Amino acid sequence: MKANKQTVHIISHTHWDREWYMPYEAHHVRLIETMNTLLETFERDPDFRSFYLDGQTIVFEDYLQVHPEKKERLQQLSREGKLAAGPWYVLQDEFLTSSEANIRNLQIGLRDAQEIGTVSKLGYFPDSFGNMGQAAQILRQAGIRTAVFGRGVKATGFNNQVGESEHLESPFSELIWKSPDGSEVLGILFANWYNNGMEIPVGPAEAAVYWDQRLERASRYASTPHLLLMNGCDHQPVQQNLSDALRTARELYPEIEFLHSDYESYIRSVGAELPEALSHIRGELRGQRTDGWYSLVNTASARVWVKQLNQQAQTLLEKTAEPLAAIAHTLGSPYPHALFRYAWKTLMQNHPHDSICGCSVDEVYREMNIRFAKSMEVGRNLAHSSADYIASRIDTSVFSAHGVNAVPFTVYNTSGYGESRVVSLELEWSHRYFKQSESPVEIAEEVQRRSHAMGTLIDSDGKALPAEITDLGVRFGYDLPDDKFRQPYMARALRITFEAEELPGMGYRSFAWIPDDGALAGNGTEGTGTSPGASLGAAGANKASAPKEISTASLAVSANTLENAWLRVCAETDGSLTLIDKRSGETYAGLGVYEDVGDIGNEYIFYQPLQDTPIITAGLPAEITLVEDTPWRATLEIVHHLPIPAAADERLAEEMRVMVPFNERLASRSANTVPLKIVTRVSLERSGKGVKVTASFDNQACDHRLRSLFPAGIDVGVHYADSIFEVAERQTVPAPEWKNPSYCHHMQTFVDVHGPNRGLVIAGKGLNEYEVLQDGQGTIAVTLLRSVGELGDWGVFPTPEAQCLGPCKAEWMIIPHGGEADRFEAYREAYTFPVPAFTAATGLHSGELPPDESFLQWSGERLAFSSLKIAESSGHPVIRWYNLSAEETALSLQPEAAAYVTDILEEATAAPVGAALPVQGYKIVTVGIPGAIR
């Protein structure tokens, strides 16, 4: 029962998209003006009590970049409760940023908020294009018990228009939002959007009309007498006469209490009067019970290159640089917390929803490209310095028996899962350092005369390994010592490609290049050769006993068929693949057919022209060539020539100019065509349990979408997609109210369609959009490119660069499996796919580390590894996993360590872990380990 006395909580705010329909600096200037006005309003009007700065600390950071002298004033206002900071660093898109990126966003946001003053303990998702299913668990582990959000439960369209539906998932704006593990928070939906209290009139006549409408709408969904009116909107200036407007409201409606409020007061009041019968909603909030037009999921395929760079940058930081730095730290190297924070912040400045989603003007993406490059440059430097530090402590003297010219190097695997993989690296040897007074030309000639590219690759047991050696000639390089001026040199460079077997999940193996002693390359020309696989042996105690035989058999059984112990893949005459899973005996046919259709939508929404017929490669002849045939990997090259329409017809430009709604457009595809040449490389590795595919093409067409199709051969009602700390179960057939012909979804790394005895996983690198077609075959359609020419939303914003003209590349992996019982092993294969091996060259020296080492040995059925880093508060290594299933499992560390459980903020929460830590279904678990991790 609602009480008669209503209280209206007016919360002043601005939703600050750092970049969107204008470039960052244009919005930045307006932010400075808005903040200056806000501070002036606080000074002038004592009744102006609070302002919410959008739940992201970067707003403070951006302001202080221009006005650093205002920091103390901001801190004072925050301590007074007038400005709450955080909890996020940026308002990210939850589905297009990784699990760990979501955590770093919260960790850094809360850290920065504490420096400002009052921390906002509110899960703030005002405009996320869908909300992650594990949000409640993440928030609860961070001590946050309430979330507010604008999308996912009820449709909200462009221009902040709230849609109606007969099938509301909650009758109230208040609900209980649960994660799959059972964690729950109070969820508050912006049922009338976050602008339902903007620009409140001061004049009585206008105010009466305004308030009658606003109060009725807010009351319609509120479960308590406390109504929320958000006094602001996107880039909304401060309403400086708000106090006057509220005085008018109090005079017009004396029976209602009007408060210039804040979130803390509002949530406390609502919590005290919540009814018992609130709806409970579990998992992802993606707007699936709507007509489907405004879920905005197709932002997952807008400017695909942005998603690909983001995947590279995230993987570099969380799966390579942080683990290597953590290992180096346990060996004595300082952990570079500040540099990691800088790298993450630079990357996360690309994570706001209008940025990473690809739905901004072109200028935004030119700047984002630079941020990606900056973050990755820091990440690479941190990874290299850590890898070099570890390598310097490895005992490589085992290779001394093969000569003083031996060139040791280390291959690191930091994916969290043990595996064998093909590695390619460049090595330098025969260095000749030189001074400024010496002639670089003569130095280069000297190195050319004395060095060569003939030799043998060995492992730490002295066993010779088959390898492909490419002579890169003599080249310039330099060292930057810690204690002296830069040191230029000339050196011989080689590229070595080979299979590094049985790499530990978090560790390394050492190898060495052994140059042949008298076989100089006479003319020094570049060339390619293969190192033999005969054993060299080793001297004394280092000699390998009964070295394991390495197969030198070809993986190419014919000109169009590859086969290893697990899989057989055949390229058919039309370039599609037939894959046989030798373990299950199941065959998957028609894999990798390309489909091209028109797209006359915008950066937010895919819309296929009426009567448009897909253009597909099925049945068209393809050129098939065996281009790589080594004992460790074989590769087929498949070339398709596909004429496609050059663009939409001329009607589209006019429809965009006058803002015809996307789903009312009548444009079609042009009769003029341009060639689309797709070069696909299909690789099978000797130890691979999946087929790796790379597609390259030069896009010269506009207004279209290109996908690759993978029939799973199973007709099932649900499928599974990698998401944030979970593999989410999703419906293949949409809800009855869904009207959009397209039913696309987000994925992080992979999507899986399976039945009891058969399944197919498609994993991608920065390919975040898929659809499971309702064709009776469970066909997975993965978007490789979407070309559009406008931003969309509330105005006319042409985006010619969103057509993504020019060279494009996409990478994915096809992983068959045996169905429900085997799917988790397939998921581990998928998780390792985007994580590259990392290498470091070193010298001949003694050290406390053995040539091969595993720093972290763990086991746990259905557990997924997430991260290894050093906690800033404790200085301890912290490691995170999550349970992919509903069943409880157990995490075991070997050898047993004095580990303890932490929350996602990496603060200890439980007693030391014993021999096995129970991990309940869908739980995210973080473990701290005092001291070393080996």
Image: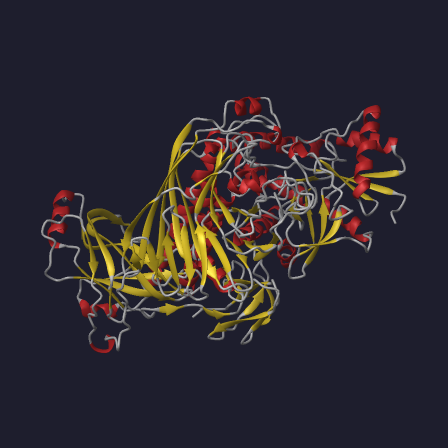
How many discs appear? 0
Q: Work out whether residue 786 can be spotted.
A: no
Figure check: 94 above or below 668: below
Q: Give residue 604's quadrant in the image.
A: top right
Depth order, front residue of 876/319: 319
| Residue 112 pos. (x, y %) | 57, 48
| Residue 481 pos. (x, y %) | 29, 53
Depth order, front residue of 224/142: 224
Figure check: 810 above or below 179: above
Chosen colour scheme: secondary structure
| Residue 308 pos. (x, y %) | 45, 45
Q: Which quadrant holds the C terminus?
A: bottom left
Depth order, front residue of 573/428: 573
Left or right: 189 with respect to 301? right
Left or right: 284 with respect to 213? left
Left or right: 765 with respect to 170? left
| Residue 250 pos. (x, y %) | 85, 33
Q: Which residue is pictured at 21% across the width and 70% down the height?
A: 535
Q: Work out whether residue 274 can be spotted.
A: yes
